[in-house]
Amino acid sequence: MTAAPQGPGFSTSVEALRLREWLLGPGQATLVMDQFSADDFHLVVDDRADVHVNSKDGSFYLGWFPSGRPGTDGLGWKIAVTGTAKVRGYQISFDTETPADVVAAAVARVLETSQQL
């Protein structure tokens, strides 16, 4: 039997090796949707019960597809921020089983980075 490595960067603690329990399953989408006000965002629920949120200036989009976005393999959430003439925008996607807590944290951070012009 070989001794475990010692020194900086190596943890011999049994605690570090224990299994963790992770938050799984989609959870409550209201954690995400409650972050949007009617003053700043448009909300549309379509005929498939998919939810679309747009900023009034059109630079932010969130789509929630509880049964998966048509034409994709399990896409549940789509966040898109429009870029400018000089800087590209970006998109973030999560599948249908991503916990709403995780999506809510991502949405909150995106919203925090916005600045009113």
Image (tube, grey):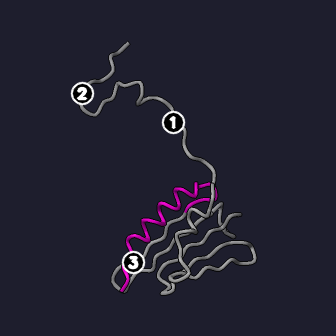
Residue 85 in percent (x, y) is at 36, 86
Corner quadrant of residue 112: bottom left
As helix, strand or loop, the secondary structure at mark 3 comes to: loop
Residue 88 in percent (x, y) is at 39, 78
As helix, strand or loop, the secondary structure at mark 2 comes to: loop
As helix, strand or loop, the secondary structure at mark 1 comes to: loop
Residue 11 in percent (x, y) is at 33, 29
Q: Which numbered disc covers residue 102?
A: none
Query: N-terminal of the two: label 2 or label 3?
Result: 2
Residue 3 in percent (x, y) is at 32, 16
Q: How dense is the environment of label 1, judged by Cα within 10 Å: few (below 14), some, or many (20 and up)?
A: few
Q: Which residue is mark 3?
A: 88
Residue at the image position 27 percent from the left and 24 percent from the top: 6
Q: Which numbered disc covers residue 20?
A: 1
- Which one is in front, 51 or 116? 116
Q: Which numbered disc covers residue 7?
A: 2
Mark 1 or 3: in front is: 1
Which portion, as a residue range, is magenta?
A: 94-117
What amino acid is labelled 1 in the image? Arg
Q: Is residue 53 left or right of residue 111?
A: right
Up-down relation of residue 116 to residue 105 (above or below): below
Mark 1 or 2: in front is: 1
**Which quadrant would the C terminus be assigned to in this image?**
bottom left
Q: Is residue 92 left or right of residue 43?
A: left
Which residue ends up furthest to the left in the rendered image? 7
Is residue 72 rendered magenta in the image?
no
Query: N-terminal of the two: label 1 or label 3?
Result: 1
Residue at the image position 58 percent from the left and 55 percent from the top: 98
Query: N-terminal of the two: label 1 or label 2?
Result: 2
